[in-house]
Image: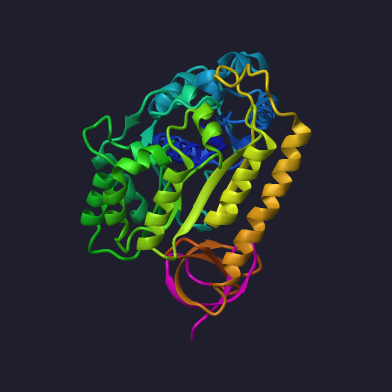
Amino acid sequence: MKIYFEPYGCTLNYGESRIMEELVETAGYTIVREPDQADVLVLVTCTVIETTENKMLKQLQEFSKYDKPVIVGGCMASVQAETVLDINPNAHLLPPDKIFEIPQMIESLNEKIDAPNEGIEDSVQEPLTSIDAIVPISNGCLGSCTYCITRLARGELRSYPQDDVLKSISNALDKGLFEIRLTAQDTAVYGLDRQTNLPGLLKMINEQFSGSNDFRIRVGMMNPNTTLPILDDLIEQYRSDLIFKFLHLPVQSGDDDILTDMKRGYKVQDFKDIVNKFRTEFPDLTLSTDIIIGYPGETEEQFNKSVELVKDIQPNIVNITRFSARPGTEAYDRKDQIVGRIQKDRSRVLTKVRFDVSTTINEKCIGNKVRILVTEVGKDDSVMGRTDSYQPVVIKKKLELGTFQEVEITEAIEAYLIGKLIE
């Protein structure tokens, strides 16, 4: 039996896809990299916005043409099962809370398949082109955001045991993967269902791997309202050399009334306080944030507050999303939806500001001498690495993945830095 996986969406989706691949391989099945080589196709879906949903449904239609068993995982399997089955009535649904059952599901399919593909060579171990390992630390969240369908798909918080997280990190290191991405819907709520918390998990990681300095941890997205109660302890753990000085803190809007309407549970000043405290401790911090454009009822003045916030806070990365009404959410039936034309206009304005800010930040780095961890093979014999603050640096030279290199920054654009080795 040969299994093909195709994940979409957030880092958590990709992490869960990798977990399922490992479970399938452990059960004795073979992972293949092309759908026409497979006996079973696995589509790991995302449904956070309508355009993504449409892309998933199109891909499901493509899968259906292969006339092979299709397993649909991810959020659509949970909250849009009927939509999936309308496209492929024979699809097998695997919601996020059932991913560990995939070997049993494939085993049941195996009994129904008369003749698996023959004449296809087992997949050959390909050379690594990147060294990142995605390690999910929890599923679900504690939020009540009015626009979020992912919350409905993944349900209540379920944190993975600390020992399991540590084991996943060890397994990744054994495979030669040295950029460990801890991921969840909201990493800051980790452990609140287990009488522990995110700083406690990071402390265990720092203690267990204290003798090692050949890998790095990237902590994934955390919401401001859940970060505030653990802020001091979190910063203390961030002092470790193992942890990238990277903060993904979605603000979603620069207007307090919009945040209240969204039920985000914090004010803009809370977001600023967290950022300022992190930057006081880690001046080179890379800050990533998210902003939703065109939430129902958003006025031009409220939108401009988001623009001014970006100019004021100067984040390295701004993930801009145009609001999309998702079925089942509180904001779905709002009568004050912002029309697409206005959303697009606002998105263009904020995108220009976002790129102006990131370009200015990066140009200030020219001439700096930094250490990078080489993490990814690039184009034309180049590689990409990450500084200790997780800034991407491109080196136009072949270098071994997983090595640390001393680099001088020579050029900068809005998305990344360009450097040369210090001989």
Residue 411 in magenta stretch: yes
Residue plotted at (23% across, 64% down): 211
Residue 349 in magenta stretch: no
Front residue (pair 261, 285): 261
Rendered image quadrant of residue 120: top right
Rendered image quadrant of residue 354: bottom right
**Exactly how many numbered labels are in the figure?**
0
- Specify start and end residues of the magenta stretch as a single range: 399-423
Task: Using residue 117 as the reference point, say whether residue 20 is left or right of it.
Answer: left
Name above or below for residue 84 compared with residue 2.
above
Name above or below for residue 116 compared with residue 190.
above
Image position, residue 266 (x, y; %): 43, 36
Residue plotted at (49% across, 36% down): 13
Front residue (pair 287, 11): 287
Res. 394 visible in picture: yes
Front residue (pair 284, 170): 284
Residue reaching furthest to the bottom: 423
Residue plotted at (50% across, 57% down): 130
Residue reaching furthest to the front: 301
Front residue (pair 18, 252): 252
Image position, residue 388 (x, y; %): 42, 65
Res. 120 visible in picture: no
- What's the colour scheme? rainbow
Image position, residue 358 (x, y; %): 60, 60
Task: Using residue 80 as the reference point, say whether residue 238 is left or right of it.
Answer: left
Rendered image quadrant of residue 57: top right
